């Protein structure tokens, strides 16, 4: 027993690496079997693996949201210290193993939306967040190998600007997709049909215990004002696994677009256009999507009708025809807070002397309006920030985040305008707050470039700010200090999180437990003891083959006695693939002893 505890203590030193290797194996298997309809079975044992739950717990507690309680009132502060966290992991493992675990209802809260309405969020408990993180870590590598490249929302290494860059890539030459369908789904996250979602999950997952656990998460219900409401549809916005499940559901729309155009060769697309059918490109970010159309407006209207029909019949969702506009590229669209339009360049000319066509990205008027409203909130008489320096610090945090998003657009002119507006707004606020004359306010709050504690290394201009209690000056961060850097379309070159070759992580040549065809509950490789023994052997042998002393990050763990059911570390040794193939027991059918 002491020896077993010692091995567990050794393995805990590299839990992130252990989980990453398992995720890579799942990813490679899902990628290689994408077209064959392979279904993963016996995955539930991974959730019971102690390192898997401990990594999930670390991810939950390291997030700022861990300070927000669920219906049980437990926060990150209640789980300080290793004994309490160890107790939580052990309790979850026991409940998940015997099937007694049931998710608690989520706590309903509301946050303001950009249009003034309220967005409902569901806050799970800490224990439920840990289980959701474990499920997400299990499903994400499988579905990352299956998702289409046109999907960008809530996926690793992908973001808003990748989606915007793709739209621009198809609007400009040589693609010349002239018409754009701006899609709007009514209450997308709230109208996800649970049965349709479970059907989509069963296409790739064959582990009924895991599917049952996900079903319980979907049907956990909501607590609002001390009243319980059942959840018959939708995924609660606020859950860790909810964005992934929403992407699994919306993948049906991506598949529709892939069948219609994405997977067609250029010759097939030309034939399609000759037959009077348009070529399309879907770009989706979560529930927001845009379809660029190479054809006529009439063909774009047909595409809109086909999308509405697919959403209605297959996905059981409604497309808002009033908000789903068809726009020409010259008129521009608004997507993810950016106005995207195609126009003539002022500097680059073609052979005829006219400006070359180019795609431009400009912060949307609503984004500029929200920026001004936020600055007005900071500098109003009703602000809850008492000291001048606190207001300046809050403004700097907001403007830095806002500018970091919009710096990839053609924002230089807007940055200059907003910087001037912000300067005068803060200056008038400081003047009125301290009842100073304009000259007195200048002398008190405007200083030379080298005085502020956040001085710029090269911009030698006078700075407006406030003084703290230690006599230090904190200046406003001008928007023009942010460097404009246009985003480059990456296409299929976006690095994959779980691809070891592109991330410097070793490429497992032969996934172990994901390839095994043992019936569920009979494969000895699915036990926690076996997995811990394998990782202990890798660490003990320093990732070197015991036959040729070659460094092998993805080596094979060989059973000396030929019995794959014996997890004793003394019976295991690390070999490279070449040395393993030379052994007498390599390739023998499973369960056959020497």
Image: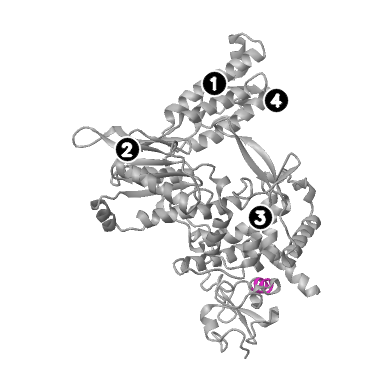
Q: Quadrant of the N terminus?
A: bottom right
Reading the image, the residue beneath label 3 is 217
- How far separated are the C-alphas under marks 2 and 4? 45 Å
Image spot of residue 157 (x, y percent): 51, 51
CA–CA distance between discs 2 and 1? 33 Å
Specify which label sits upstream in the sequence, 1 or 3: 3
Instruction: Please give the range of residues in magenta.
Output: 531-537
Position of 128 compared to 315: left or right? right
Residue that mark 4 sits on:
384
Judge whether 136 appears above or below 167 on screen: below
Determine the secondary structure under disc 1. helix
Tell me the residue that label 1 is attached to: 423
Q: In the rendered image, which quarter is residue 289 located in?
A: top left
Which of the numbered marks, if any, corresponds to residue 358? 2
Q: Cα distance, mark 4 to mark 1?
A: 21 Å
N-terminal label among 4 and 1 = 4
349 on left or right of 84? left
Which mark identifies residue 457? none
Left/right of residue 108 with respect to residue 180 in the rendered view: right
- Indicate which disc, 4 or 3, sits on the residue closer to the N terminus: 3
């Amino acid at each position: 027993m002491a020896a077993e505890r010692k091995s567990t203590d050794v393995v805990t030193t590299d839990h992130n690496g252990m989980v990453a290797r398992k995720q890579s194996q799942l990813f490679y298997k899902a990628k290689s079997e994408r077209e064959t309809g392979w279904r993963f079975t016996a995955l539930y044992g991974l959730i019971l693996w102690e390192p898997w739950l401990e990594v999930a717990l670390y991810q939950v507690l390291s997030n700022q949201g861990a300070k927000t309680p669920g219906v049980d009132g437990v926060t990150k502060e209640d789980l300080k210290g290793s004994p309490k966290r160890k107790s939580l992991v052990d309790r979850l493992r026991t409940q998940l193993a015997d099937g007694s675990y049931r998710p608690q209802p989520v706590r309903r809260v509301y946050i303001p939306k950009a249009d003034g309405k309220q967005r409902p969020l569901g806050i799970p408990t800490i224990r439920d967040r840990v289980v959701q993180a474990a499920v997400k870590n299990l499903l994400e590598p499988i579905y990352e190998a299956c998702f289409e490249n046109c999907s960008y929302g809530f996926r690793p290494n992908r973001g808003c600007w990748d989606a915007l860059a793709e739209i621009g890539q198809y609007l400009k030459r040589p693609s010349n997709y002239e018409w754009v369908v701006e899609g709007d789904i009514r209450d997308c996250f709230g109208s996800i049909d649970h049965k349709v979602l479970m059907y989509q999950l069963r296409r790739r997952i064959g582990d009924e215990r895991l599917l049952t656990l996900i079903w319980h998460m979907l049907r956990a219900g909501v607590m609002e004002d001390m009243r319980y409401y059942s959840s018959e549809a939708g995924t609660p916005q606020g859950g860790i696994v909810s964005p992934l499940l929403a992407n699994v559901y919306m993948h049906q729309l991506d598949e529709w677009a892939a069948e219609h155009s994405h997977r067609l060769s250029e010759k097939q697309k030309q034939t399609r256009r000759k037959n009077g059918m348009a070529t399309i490109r879907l770009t989706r970010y979560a529930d927001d999507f845009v379809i660029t159309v190479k054809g006529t407006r009439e063909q774009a209207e047909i595409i809109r009708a086909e999308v509405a029909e697919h959403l209605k019949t297959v996905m059981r969702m409604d497309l808002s025809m009033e908000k789903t506009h068809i726009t020409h590229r010259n008129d521009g669209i608004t997507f993810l807070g950016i106005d995207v339009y195609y126009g003539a360049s002022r500097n680059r000319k073609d052979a005829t002397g006219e400006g070359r066509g180019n795609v431009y990205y400009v912060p949307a008027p609503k984004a500029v309006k929200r920026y001004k409203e936020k600055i007005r909130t900071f500098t109003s008489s009703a602000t809850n920030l008492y000291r001048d320096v606190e207001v300046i610090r809050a403004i700097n945090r907001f403007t830095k985040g806002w500018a970091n998003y919009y710096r990839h657009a053609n924002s230089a002119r807007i940055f200059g305008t907003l910087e001037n507006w912000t300067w005068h707004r803060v200056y008038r606020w400081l003047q009125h707050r301290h009842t100073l004359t304009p000259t007195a306010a200048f002398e008190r709050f405007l200083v030379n470039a080298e005085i502020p504690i956040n001085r710029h290394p090269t911009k030698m201009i006078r700075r407006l700010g406030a003084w703290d209690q230690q006599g230090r000056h904190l200046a406003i961060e001008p928007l023009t200090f942010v460097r404009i850097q246009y985003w480059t379309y990456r296409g299929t070159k976006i690095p994959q999180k779980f691809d070891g070759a592109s991330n410097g992580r070793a490429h497992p040549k032969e996934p172990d437990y994901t390839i095994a065809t043992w019936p569920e509950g009979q494969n000895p490789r699915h036990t926690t003891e076996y997995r811990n023994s394998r990782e202990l052997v890798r660490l003990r042998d320093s990732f070197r083959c015991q036959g040729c002393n070659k460094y092998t990050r993805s080596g094979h763990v060989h059973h000396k006695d030929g019995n794959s059911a014996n997890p004793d570390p003394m019976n295991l040794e690390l070999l490279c693939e070449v040395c393993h193939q030379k052994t007498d027991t390599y390739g023998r059918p499973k369960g056959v002893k020497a």
